[in-house]
Amino acid sequence: MPDDNSFPFVLKVCSDYHKVWEGQGVHGLVYKMGFDSDVFGNTLLRFYDECSGVNDADKVFDKTSERYSFLVNLLINFLILTDSLSATCHFSVPDQFRSKSKIFRGKNFDQAMVTRTIDLRSDTVTKPTETMRLAMAKAEVDDDVLIYDPTARHLETEMARITGKEAALFVPSGTMGNLISVLVHCEIRGSEVILGNNSHIHIYENGGISTIGGVHPRPVKNNEDGTMDINLIESAIRNPDFEICYPKTRLICLENSHANSGGRVLSVDYTDQVGELAKKHNLKLHIDGARIFNASVALGVPVHRLVQAADSVSVCLSKGLGAPVGSVIVGTKSFIDRARILRKTLGGGMRQVGILCAAALVALQENVGKLGNDHKNAKTLAEGLNKIKGLKADVASVETNIVYFEILEGSNITALKLGKILEEHGILLMPDSSSRVRIVIHHQVSASDVQYTLSCIKQAMTGVENGGN
């Protein structure tokens, strides 16, 4: 194990990283050592990101952990080798570190460096922060089915305020939130809802509005930006004079931001137009706002204004906001009263739910302000992917935290194969097809994680091009 005094020393090494790396020709030396310089450099940056400003190792790592031992040994080793092999790189490495270090070379380095997973599959994969865990442990709770849980009431009141609606209800998932909302608006079986053909409700929610609610979906083509043409929406509304044959249209659903369109955002003007159309035909408007906070930040428009035209909205707490569980639906008081009954019917009435709501309150306080950085990292990632031979990303379409990229024909690698290669480097992503990959950025992905990911993807694509693994 490294000496206890090694931690401050390693921090100093990391803080001097740019000076050494850029100014003294370390890239070539690292290649001689059998390492990939970009991957190595970004490992240092990731380590420094987590440790910056911390003088006590116990605040970051358990010093008995394999990860702490590896990182300290790796950096000390690097210094020893640069000190002995390069006339331009000189560090004063204490003797006790030299005697305790273990050399990592080539494949051993590649295996050892996978000390932290960068999970880019979705923004649903985040782990609760320490602040969330503490809030959960201390949460004041009661029976929420009896409407007595004070922490749940606090969260619901806050979400109603943020969205500008009369009332709110915590539900276990976004799927349940959308299902309840559709069923409240479409109480009569055989009702019809107009929604995007590429929307989450239509594709990824098990057909629940039909199987459970007897509600008929009327899909309208989504444009690349997630919108549906207003004239196509109006054309899809059934003629009430021919109810003898047609189901009755009762609801229009929008999704903002629009996940399958790459996190594109729907403008206030567009949403207002759809709202006016709904009113004109005496219909209701529901917004699947799983990532409505992302849309709000991207547009620079408050959430309450974005959803002003909607009769109901579902908001996911466990996506970009990073809470461990749950969504909230908002609407009028009468809407929420009926939604509460349906939540119980569907098995979503939980008891001391304040434990979960406490984490969500922390997410609202701490993570909304981080969404802009997530969007910036997503844009950086897309720009970097576009520079890698054999890949293509539509940089202009990256408006929030979702990035899709294509593997071009002739690249001799599939999305699944690329995913397996990256997994060996501690990076998880989600193939969307044999040649298309989805990446989602969240608050637990740093700028250096993005650079590390780009380095590994470039290495994988270069290896395939050169006939390697």
Image (cartoon, grey):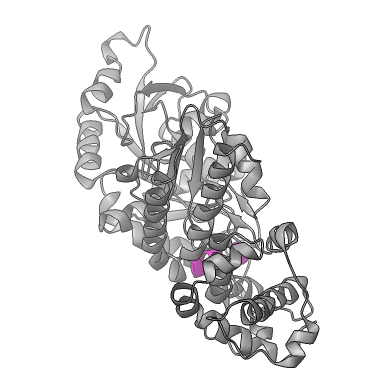
The region drawn magenta spans 355-363
The image shows residue 406 at horizontal and vertical percentages of: 45, 35
- On whether residue 360 falls in the magenta region, the answer is yes
Residue drawn 73% across the image and 58% down it: 111
Residue 158: name its quadrant: bottom left
- On whether residue 310 falls in the magenta region, the answer is no
The image shows residue 283 at horizontal and vertical percentages of: 29, 31
Residue drawn 65% across the image and 63% down it: 116
**Residue 462, can we see it?**
yes
Q: Is residue 158 above or below residue 119?
A: below
Residue nearest the observer in this picture, 338 or 223: 223
Residue 115: name its quadrant: bottom right
Residue nearest the observer in this picture, 348 or 37: 37
Name of the residue lying farthest toward the front: 87
Residue 134: name its quadrant: bottom right
**Left or right side of 414 for 389:** left
Residue nearest the observer in this picture, 431 or 83: 83
